[in-house]
Amino acid sequence: MTDMQAIRSYDTKPTSSEYTAFQAAYDSYNAALFGGALPDCLITLQRKRGALGYFWASQFTARSGPGETDEIALNPEGFHDTTEQILSTLAHEMAHHPQGGYPGSTILARRAAAATTTRSGRQR
């Protein structure tokens, strides 16, 4: 099963299917669009009215030991869109990651989203 198929359909473990596919997409985009420079983060599903997703720097602290990680949240209310649109949102939020979510990261986010949608033959 490809990563895209895992996002579209569920096996008997929908949590595993969704998060495995999102992690694989994150890893793929990190390598292709960011040269592998982005650190790992926690991808979550969160409902936030009016947003397809968001990036939040240093949102989670490790439960055991030191450390914290950033969050990329994707809104499942937007999942009625195509797989390409969902993955475009992921790439958009990933572009905020290297900037720590600070001003200026919007330009990078738009470039990353444009790169992913151009490859799929549609513009965002």
Image (tube, rainbow, N blue to C red):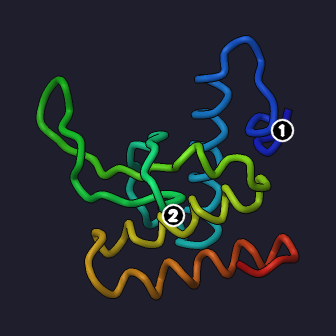
Image quadrant where one finds the N terminus: top right
User: Sequence-wise, which precedes: disc 1 or disc 2?
Assistant: 1
Q: Image point 76% across, 24% down: which residue?
A: 10
Which quadrant of the view contains residue 68?
A: top left
Q: Position of residue 104 (x, y in %)?
A: 34, 87
What residue lies at 37% left-to-right and 60% top-to-bottom? Answer: 55
Relative horizontal placement of residue 55, taking residue 33 as reference (left or right): left
**Residue 66, position in %: x, y?**
12, 36
Residue 65 quadrant: top left
Check the image and report above or below for 26 versus 121. Answer: above
In the image, taking residue 58 as reference, residue 7 lies left or right, namely: right
Instruction: Identify residue for label 1.
Output: 5
Q: Residue furthest top?
A: 12
Q: Which residue is labeled 2 in the image? A: 36
Q: What quarter of the picture does the C terminus occupy?
A: bottom right
Q: Regarding mark 1 in the picture, which secondary structure is present there?
A: helix
Expressed as whole percent of the image width and height from the top left, the position of residue 25 reads: 65, 51
Give the residue at the far left of this rendering.
66
Is 88 situated above or below 18? below
Using the image, tell me which numbered label, if any, was put on residue 98: none
Residue at 69 percent across and 79 percent down: it is 115
- Between marks 1 and 2 in the image, the one whose residue lies nearer the viewer: 1
Tell me the amino acid under the disc marked 2: Gly
**Relative to residue 48, is residue 78 drawn left or right?**
right
Q: Is residue 2 above or below residue 83?
A: above
Q: Secondary structure at mark 2?
A: loop
User: Residues under labels 1 and 2: Cα distance?
Assistant: 24 Å
Q: Is residue 74 left or right of residue 103?
A: right
The amino acid pointed to by label 1 is Gln
Number of other residues with Cα within 10 Å of mark 2, as a class: few under 14, some 14 to 19, many 20 or more: few
**Residue 38 position in % (x across, y down):** 42, 63
